[in-house]
Amino acid sequence: MFGFGQLIEILKKNPKKIVFTEGEDSRILEAASRLLASNFLHPILVGDPEKINASAEKSGFNIRGAEIIDPMKFDRMDEMVELFCELRKSKGVTPEQAKGILSSANYFGTMLVKMGIADALLGGATYSTADTVRPALQLIKTKPGNTIVSSCFILVRPSATGENEVLAMSDCAINIHPTEDELVEIAGESAECAKIFGIDPKVAFLSYSTLGSGKGEDVDKMRNAAHKAKEKYPNLPIEGEIQFDAAVAPRVARTKCPQSEVAGHANTFIFPDINAGNIGYKIAQRLGNFEAYGPILLGLNAPINDLSRGCNAGEVYSMAIITAALA
C-alpha cells in the first residue's frame, strides 16, 4: 500500500521540476531545502532572488541549486506575454495588460508550467484556493472530455497489519453542489488518482440512504450518478447510493446490501456536496487519526495543487512529492 517511498522511487527515475509561487515563504524554503538535498525533485522558486536568498539565510535553509525566477527580470517574458494573449484572446487581453497580470506570482508560475519550463505547480501557502485554481482554469485548462476541476484528499494511517490504510475522498474542496454528471466525472478522476497511491478503487456514492432505503432529491441524485458512473466505467467497482456504514463495515453491508461487491470494502468515497465532503474528511483526519493529503486537484491538463494557508513545511514537502508524481 501507499508510502512516500514509492513515489520518491518513481521520481528518482524521472526527476521533475516543480514551481513554488511563494518563493520567499519560510515554509516553502524549508521544503525546498529538503528537496534539494534529496535530488529527486527540482524546485523553481518564484520571486526576487535577493529577497529569497536573504530569507533562506535568515531562517538557516540551504537552497543552493534552486532555480529562482523573478517575474520582473524573466528573459522569456515577451514569449510568455505573447502566449498569454493568445490564450486569453477571447477576453481581449492586451500585451500591456498581460504584463501586469503576469507580475502576479500565481499567474507567472502557471505560465511556467504552460510553457514547459516546469512540470507542476504548488501554490496556496499565502494565496486562496481560488487564486490558485483560477489561473489554472484559464491557462492550463481541463483535460479533453472533462468539464470541471475537482479535488481529492488521500487519507493515510497505519493499520494493524503493518501496512498503511489508504482512502480517497472527493470532492471536499472545489465543487459546492456538483450535478449528477459532475459527480460521475469526479468519481472517474478520483479512481485514477487513487490508483497512483496504491488503492485498488472501490467507489461508493455516499448518501443517507442505501439502495432505496431513504427518499429525497439528494438520494435520487446519488443513485442516478452511481448508475451513470457504472455505465461510463464498466470495469470500475461502484455502488450507490449507499450509507457510509454499509460502505465500510462488512457486517452492516451483509444486512443492507448483501449482493454488492463494493459494500463493506469501499475505499474511494464520493460525497454529494462540499459540505459533506469537507466535514467528512476532517472527521476522519481529527478523530480517525488519518493523515490527510490534499486537496489534490483533478481534471487539469497539468498537475497544479493548492496548499492550505495554515500548512507547515512538512505538508509542503509531502504535497510537492504528490504533485510531481502526478506529472
Image: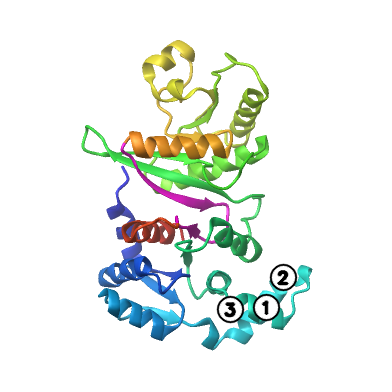
Q: Is residue 296 magenta?
A: yes
Residue 185 left/right relative to 248: right
Asked whether the beta carbons under mark 1 and mark 2 sit within 8 Å of each other, the answer is yes
Quarter of the picture holding the N terminus? top left
Residue annotated with mark 1: 98
Query: Is residue 76 visible in the rendered structure shown here?
Result: yes
Residue 318: x and y, percent?
35, 57
Name the element at disc 1.
helix
Residues at marks 3 and 1, CA–CA distance in whole angstroms: 9 Å
Name the element at disc 2.
loop
Q: Amino acid at mark 1?
A: Ala
Name the element at disc 3.
loop
Q: Amino acid at mark 3?
A: Ser
Q: Which residues are magenta?
A: 289-308
Marks 2, 3: nearer the viewer: 3
Q: Residue at x 66, y 50 (%)?
A: 145
Q: Amino acid at mark 2?
A: Arg
Residue 164: x and y, percent?
28, 40
Residues at marks 1 and 2, CA–CA distance in whole angstroms: 9 Å
Which numbered disc covers residue 103? 3
Marker count (numbered): 3
| Crowd tier of the residue under label 3, counting other residues whose Cα lies within 10 Å: few below 14, some 14–19, many 20 or above | some
Front one among 223 and 188: 223
Asked whether the beta carbons under mark 3 and mark 1 sit within 8 Å of each other, the answer is no
* Snapshot quadrant of residue 8: bottom left
| Crowd tier of the residue under label 2, counting other residues whose Cα lies within 10 Å: few below 14, some 14–19, many 20 or above | some
Measured along the vertical axis of the image, is residue 198 above or below residue 270? below
* Snapshot quadrant of residue 264: top left
Residue annotated with mark 2: 88
Residue 184 left/right relative to 289: right
